[in-house]
């Protein structure tokens, strides 16, 4: 049996997050992740996914509600922002950090990039300076060499492998 196992929530309604988190805890999950990074049209249309990065105080409330309801570790998965060079992420991280996320996973591309282009390693390095919890990097990791380089260059604590891992990564 592999552990830990996390469940991911998306949405933006605090009461729905509380109820869902209680169910997730009851199912035996070890951790809950809040999706603040998905750029899919069907997810963002209701100010969900990456659109939540425009509302850091709401995300802080979601983190606090889930932690209070379950006592489980809570993480967030985010992107660098909506559009290239918007630097939304720095303000976002500063504002949500007070809620105490146990881990922050950053997809090192912008929402407008979806899953194309190279990860922004320079911004990834700068994020290590402000993220005071576990810092995980995601996005564009398509070879073992790139995985080792991104980890070393960003100073992150770990890597999250996505789409390329289902191909010929290892």
Image: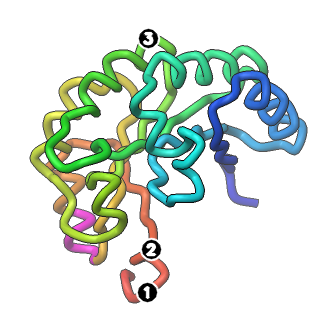
The numbered dot on residue 98 is 3
**How many numbered tags mark residues here?**
3
Residue at 48 percent of width and 53 percent of height: 38
Q: Quadrant of residue 138?
A: bottom left
Q: Which residues are magenta?
A: 143-148
Residue at 44 percent of width and 44 percent of height: 50
* Position above or below: 87 against 10: above
The residue wearing badge 2 is 163
Direction front: furthest residue? 45
Please tell me how crowded label 1 is: few (under 14), some (14-19), or many (20+) other residues with Cα within 10 Å.
few
Q: Position of residue 159 (x, y in %)?
A: 37, 55
In magenta segment, residue 127: no
In front of the other: 159 or 48:
48
Apparent side of residue 72 relative to residue 141 in the rendered image (left or right): right
Apparent side of residue 56 relative to residue 43 in the rendered image (left or right): left
Direction top: furthest residue? 98
Q: Quadrant of residue 53?
A: top left
In front of the other: 145 or 44:
44
The residue wearing badge 1 is 167
Q: Position of residue 102 (x, y in %)?
A: 51, 27
Q: Quadrant of residue 136?
A: top left
Apparent side of residue 50 relative to residue 10 in the rendered image (left or right): left
Residue at 14 percent of width and 34 percent of height: 126
- The CA span between labels 3 and 1 is 38 Å
Q: Are discs 3 and 1 less than 8 Å apart at CB?
A: no
- The CA span between labels 2 and 3 is 32 Å
């Amino acid at each position: 049996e592999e552990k830990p196992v996390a469940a991911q929530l998306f949405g933006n309604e605090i009461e729905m997050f509380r109820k869902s988190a209680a169910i997730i805890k009851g199912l035996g999950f070890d951790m809950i992740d809040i999706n603040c990074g998905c750029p899919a049209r069907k997810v963002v249309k209701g100010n969900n996914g990456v659109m939540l990065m425009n509302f850091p105080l709401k995300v802080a409330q979601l983190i606090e509600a889930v932690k209070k309801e379950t006592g489980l570790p809570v993480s967030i998965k985010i992107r660098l922002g909506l559009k290239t060079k918007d630097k939304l992420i720095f303000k976002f991280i500063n504002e949500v950090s007070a809620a105490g996320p146990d881990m922050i996973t950053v997809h090192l591309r912008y929402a407008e990039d979806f899953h194309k282009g190279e990860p922004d390693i320079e911004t990834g390095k700068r994020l290590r300076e402000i993220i005071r919890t576990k810092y995980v990097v995601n996005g564009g990791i398509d070879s073992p060499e790139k995985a080792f380089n991104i980890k070393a260059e960003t100073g992150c604590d770990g890597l999250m492998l996505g789409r390329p891992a289902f191909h010929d990564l290892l």
